Image: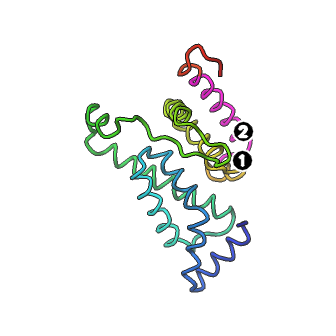
Amino acid sequence: MDASDEGKIVQSVLSGDKESYADLVREHQEKIRRVCLLILRNPAEADDAAQDVFVKAYESLSRFRGQSSFATWLYRIAHNHCMDMLRQKTRRKTDSWDALLENHPEGSPALPSTSEKNPVSEEDRELVSNVLSSLRREHREILMLREVGGFTYDEIASSLECSLDAVKARLRRARLEMMEKARHFLGSKIV
């Protein structure tokens, strides 16, 4: 679905065809869930957050101006919503380390396979998850947007409200950090 199709669907929904919104949800639900999982790092919370994002987007659909793609606008809502959730969590009493390990004995959530043609082994998925979780949040976020979410450089620039050059520079730094961390996790193996 391209941007003009999405624009037509948005106009259709605003004109009263509320059922058309389901097409937009189907088109973007997996990317938005991945973005939520990236930020929240809890599958159940990511599912809830993604659902909340689509409700918020629906309620504020009249404010969508079409200056960016619908995906970019939706990502921005998802990002802001998840960051709000994280801020609320930090205000609450934090769990002990033992409680955190009890709730997530397997470590951080594994990344979903991004391609059915190239399935990822559980060991590789765990390695990538461990490396990603060790990155700075802004590096982890931009890598997930590009590599897992499949966002274009322009969409990332619009979503993060920065220039295209800044996106390229951040991605380069994030990839370098990831390579360095991967070397750490792999020990003597060459990455």
**Residue for badge 2:** 168
Q: Nearer the viewer, residue 186 or 158?
A: 186
Q: Residue at x 60, y 85 (%)?
A: 15
Residue 47 place in picture, x, y as percent? 44, 56
- How many labels were placed on the picture? 2
Which residue is outermost to the bottom? 16
Left/right of residue 159 with respect to residue 38 in the rendered view: right
* Contact (Cβ within 8 Å) of mark 2 with mark 1: yes
Q: Residue at x 72, y 51 (%)?
A: 154
Residue 156 place in picture, x, y as percent? 66, 49
Q: Residue at x 63, y 75 (%)?
A: 10
Q: Secondary structure at mark 1?
A: helix
In the picture, the quarter occupied by the C terminus is: top right
Q: Nearer the viewer, residue 3 or 90?
A: 3
Whether residue 137 is in magenta: the answer is no
User: Residue 9's image quarter?
Assistant: bottom right
The kind of residue tagged 1 is: Tyr
Q: Residue at x 39, y 35 (%)?
A: 106
